[in-house]
């Protein structure tokens, strides 16, 4: 049972709240539709239920609030628009990444694609999908955790009749398995065809809550059509007088200053308007279906030619109870569905997995973990369940990282060969490809860019499940991103060093690329510089929520911070630290090896460099800023 109690959105400047004290229920085993015109508050209500928008009210999913559910993606699946993924990522890569966020096996992505008949979309990039395909991939992402509740915001808006039928069968199959389905629409005909129960919302308030049969019958009865510039005010007056007289009257505002009043007459509505001084432009009685508030036209920017729909299953003209399209075994839904009772449907197991049977559009996982924990206190923004796996899939799912690494290697090779032509250039400078004109070598810049994109692309293309609230700022995800970006930075640093050494040997002979004697310390400093730049870009992008801020932070270290640190270090020392290692050896409980002296000295030389000190200071400041902004954001939620 899905229960929404007292949903109220916050005020926006001088405008009234989009949703005001909205209360309704969506029972399991049925399709519930929120019906309302554009601006009625349907989408805002869904976002309030999922915790994606601030406001008041309580929403319970099978008796538990969303913040008390350990794994929200396994209890609630949501489709609130286009797939929020990187346009260069494939559909299969997007679903695998969501699997890591939801804590389900990666093989579940292929299972859902096959069960929904979308296997042909697995290798398609998200930016090449048509509107219908994009929404189907969104539905597949919502079903990865085998959730009990599906929440969808106008899933069939702008789709042709064939794809609407596909959605109808999908939602009906999920409800027939005992799940809860809640979706929105602005078309009364669509609501009467799809829903078992219709909840009419107008101006953020509940207007009517009826079964589909009663809704179809009342929509066909006579109504009073009113056109007035004060439609909202007149609707409130009509409802107030109807409640006072205890008469069943329904007033629904339409677009363009239209008002439809059911259960009343022209005389009663006209007298109400006259008593309160409401100007009327039209007052007449009509009968028939209410027209949709907005024309459901496809978006020309997202629709592709019909040839793109190669993976879309063709519906079979089978009126009987035989098998339907691939992945959906329910027959087409009639235009006027009869009322359904939960007793007539298949029962679900206590953990919500349900019987697989032959009525589900997507096969359920055999051993589905319990999605609700009575004693759990995790917040909605808990981050991916498997953060390291999620981050690896995020980084390797697109070619951006490979292209950045390739550009770094190519730029380093060119600079290395040019710098080594001069005998005055030290070998370490040539191997690092770091001329004086550049603030950082290409490898360090590439590492910083990869770190900045780790959080920057997350805010631009939020890939986490929609019920998790976009981008999580928990420390688990931060540590995962830091570990993966550090590994990528080390790979780039080692690859550039090896490639530059081989290039020097090839161009200038075997002796040109010989490593210096202190190569361990130089290599440690080289790797530390790359990792530090990657972390600086990562933290700055996480604090300011944009990748360009991460790149700016990386460049600010050698351009601004390092010169200041260098000036501060040019101070004569009164008390030298000579003999520090010997005194440390005497105080140590475990006898240190003699090689530790060289290791400590090498590390000290690396840290004592102005760039190293600047990186340490920058990382310290960025970590504090990240913790401060992250804690404030979580407290606001």
Image (spheres, rainbow, N blue to C red):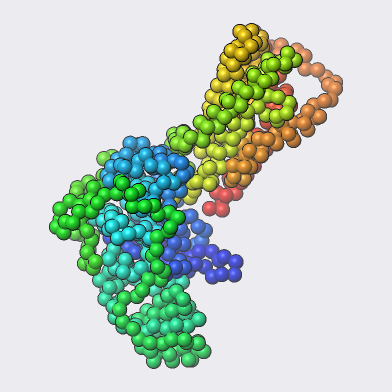
Q: Residue at x 57, y 29 (%)?
A: 407
Q: Residue at x 43, y 76 (%)?
A: 253
Residue 551 place in picture, x, y as percent: 63, 38
In the image, 277 versus 226, the foreground residue is: 226
**Residue 158 image-quadrant placement:** bottom left
Which residue: 63% across, 28% down?
442
Instruction: State whether residue 82 appears in this view.
Output: yes
Determine whether 397 is above or below 198 in the image: above
Q: Quadrant of the N terminus?
A: bottom left
Q: Viewer-proximal residue, 489 or 584?
A: 489
Left or right of residue 598, residue 464 in this image: left
Q: Residue at x 38, y 42 (%)?
A: 124
Q: Position of residue 68 (x, y in %)?
A: 43, 50
Locate residue 377 relative to residue 482 in the image: left or right.
left
The answer to whether residue 483 of the structure is visible from this angle is no
Expressed as whole percent of the image width and height from the top left, the position of residue 606 reads: 68, 21
């Amino acid at each position: 049972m899905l229960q929404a109690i007292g949903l109220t959105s916050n005020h926006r400047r001088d405008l009234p709240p989009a949703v005001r004290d909205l209360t309704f229920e969506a029972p399991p085993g049925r399709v519930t539709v929120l019906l309302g015109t554009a601006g009625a508050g349907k989408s805002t209500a869904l976002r309030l239920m999922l915790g994606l928008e601030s406001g008041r009210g309580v929403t319970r999913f099978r008796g538990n609030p969303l913040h008390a559910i350990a794994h929200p993606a396994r209890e609630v699946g949501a489709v609130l628009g286009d797939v929020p993924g990187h346009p260069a990522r494939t559909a299969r890569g997007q679903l695998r990444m969501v699997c890591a966020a939801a804590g389900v096996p990666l093989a579940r992505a292929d299972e859902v694609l096959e069960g929904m008949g979308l296997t042909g979309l697995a290798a398609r990039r998200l930016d090449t999908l048509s509107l219908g395909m994009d929404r189907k991939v969104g539905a597949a992402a919502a079903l990865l955790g085998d959730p009990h509740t599906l929440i969808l915001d106008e899933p069939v808006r702008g789709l042709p009749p064939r794809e609407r039928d596909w959605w109808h069968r999908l939602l009906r199959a999920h409800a027939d398995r005992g799940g809860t389905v809640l979706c929105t629409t602005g078309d009364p005909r669509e609501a009467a065809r799809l829903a078992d129960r219709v909840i009419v919302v107008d101006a953020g308030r509940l207007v009517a809550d009826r079964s589909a049969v009663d809704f179809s019958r009342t929509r066909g009865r006579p109504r009073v059509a009113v056109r007035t510039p004060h439609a909202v005010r007149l609707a409130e007056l009509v409802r107030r007088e109807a409640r006072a007289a205890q008469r069943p009257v329904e007033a629904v505002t339409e677009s363009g200053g239209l008002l439809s009043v059911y259960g009343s007459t022209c005389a009663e509505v006209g007298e109400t308007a006259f008593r309160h001084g409401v100007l009327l432009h039209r007052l007449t009685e009509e009968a028939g279906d209410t027209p949709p508030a907005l024309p459901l036209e496809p978006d020309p920017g997202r629709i592709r030619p019909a040839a793109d729909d190669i993976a879309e299953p063709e519906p079979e003209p089978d009126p009987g109870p035989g098998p339907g399209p691939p992945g959906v075994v329910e027959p087409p839904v009639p235009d006027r569905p009869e009322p359904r009772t939960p007793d007539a449907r298949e029962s679900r197991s206590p953990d919500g997995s349900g019987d697989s049977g032959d009525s589900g559009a997507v096969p359920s996982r055999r051993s589905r973990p319990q999605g609700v924990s009575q004693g759990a206190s995790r917040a909605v923004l808990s981050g991916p369940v498997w953060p390291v796996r999620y981050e690896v899939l995020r980084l390797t799912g697109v070619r951006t990282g490979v292209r950045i690494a390739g550009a770094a290697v190519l730029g380093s090779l060119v600079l290395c060969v040019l710098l080594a032509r001069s005998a005055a250039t030290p070998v370490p400078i040539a191997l690092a490809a770091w001329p004086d004109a550049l603030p950082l070598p290409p490898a360090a810049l590439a590492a910083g860019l990869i770190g900045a994109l780790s959080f920057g692309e997350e805010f631009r293309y939020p890939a986490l499940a929609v019920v998790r609230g976009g981008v999580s700022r928990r420390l688990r995800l931060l540590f995962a991103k830091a570990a993966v970006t550090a590994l990528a930075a080390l790979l780039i640093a080692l690859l550039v060093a090896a490639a530059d050494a081989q290039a020097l040997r090839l161009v200038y002979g075997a002796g040109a690329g010989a490593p210096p004697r202190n190569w361990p310390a130089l290599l440690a400093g080289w790797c530390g510089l790359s990792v530090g730049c990657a972390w600086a870009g990562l933290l700055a992008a996480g604090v300011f929520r944009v990748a360009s801020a991460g790149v700016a932070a990386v460049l600010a270290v050698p351009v601004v911070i390092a010169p200041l640190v260098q000036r501060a270090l040019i101070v004569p020392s009164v008390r030298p630290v000579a003999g520090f290692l010997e005194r440390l050896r005497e105080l140590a409980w475990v006898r240190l090896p003699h090689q530790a002296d060289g290791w400590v000295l090498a590390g000290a030389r690396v840290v004592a460099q102005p760039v190293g000190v600047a990186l340490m200071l920058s990382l310290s400041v960025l970590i504090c800023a990240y913790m401060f902004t992250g804690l404030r954001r979580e407290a606001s939620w």
